Image (cartoon, rainbow, N blue to C red):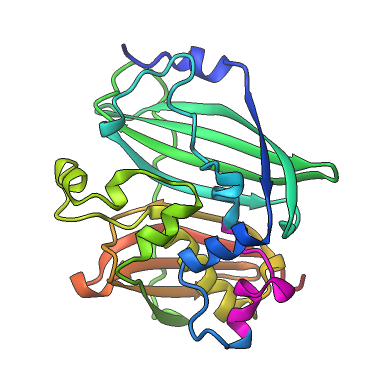
Amino acid sequence: MPIDAAAAVSAEPRTAALAWGHKDIQLYHLGIGAGIPATDPDELRYTLESELHVLPSFATVAGGRMALAGGLNGPGIDVDLAAVLHGGQTVELHRPIPVTGDATQTSRVAAVYDKGKAAVIVLRTEAADADGPLWTCDSRIFVRGEGGFGGERGPSERLETPDREPDRTVERATREDQALLYRLSGDWNPLHADPGFAKLAGFEKPILHGLCSYGMVLKAVVDTELGGDVARVHSYTTRFAGVVYPGETLRIRMWREGEGRVQVTASAVERDDAPVLGDTVVAYAEHS
């Protein structure tokens, strides 16, 4: 059945309860590579409950509910999950995420774009607690073979990489068991753990979650450009440009683009700088 964009966008929002505590935060941080060196004070703020600060990308897994969960089985959408790719992700913070939380998440399809041979579904999730809004997530879901339904093409501009050397370049290694640890935060897709399933999907072995790379890159920017202050992050957006195999190293390049903005690229060192994240921007406050 082709996508009915009008039905998808006009459908009633879905709501779900979210709850999390310090163990969920610590597990997520370990899943994106925090804790090395284990006794480094700069790492303890991600791993020790008495020092804990919450990296904003935790919003994508809070409560064990992935930011894009449930977006592909609503009214007007009937797609083959084997044709689905996570195309991009944005997290906008309305205030710092608390270490312990009870919130309500509201999800809806914000837009459906017709790219010809594919469709792009924009799933928007908003979370709020008793004190008001916490975050808004936009997940851009690319569905191969589902275009051609006559809808709007939507935005397609690419962010030009600055024509100068990066202001900072860092490398972050991933562990061979990185995907196995990260998936404990709620993304159980066997693509990231089962070699047989990965081969069926066209990969030589299981791949790292795109949202794991997403979290690793944000942590690198916060640690090196923002003095480790997670509360300074306003928003973080990326396009998933390629895969990472667990055990590979991310090369993260950063350009300061005016006040309150860092542009970033990430690539896989061992595969000749194969692109991993593109069109990536961290917007931040000068001071928290």
- Residue 191, image x, y percentages: 28, 47
Screen quadrant of the C terminus: bottom right
Image point (55%, 81%), residue name: 224
Screen quadrant of the N terminus: top left
Q: Residue furthest right?
A: 131
Front-most of residues 73 and 126: 73
- Residue 112, image x, y percentages: 45, 26
Where are the magenta residues, as a range?
Answer: 42-57
**Residue 79 in magenta?**
no
Q: In the rendered view, tell whether residue 186 sits above or below residue 160.
A: above
Asked if residue 256 can be seen in this view, the reply is no
Image point (55%, 45%), residue name: 64
Residue 229 falls left or right of residue 9: right
- Residue 46, image x, y percentages: 61, 72
Rendered image quadrant of residue 80: top left
Front-most of residues 230 and 168: 230
Rendered image quadrant of residue 110: top right
- Residue 243, image x, y percentages: 28, 57
Residue 288 falls left or right of residue 163: right
Exactly how many numbered labels are in the figure?
0
Front-most of residues 89 and 129: 129
**Residue 46 in magenta?**
yes
Image point (40%, 36%), residue name: 141
Asked if residue 71 can be seen in this view, the reply is yes
Prevailing secondary structure class for the magenta stretch in the rendered image? helix
Front-most of residues 241 and 41: 41
Residue 75 falls left or right of residue 142: right
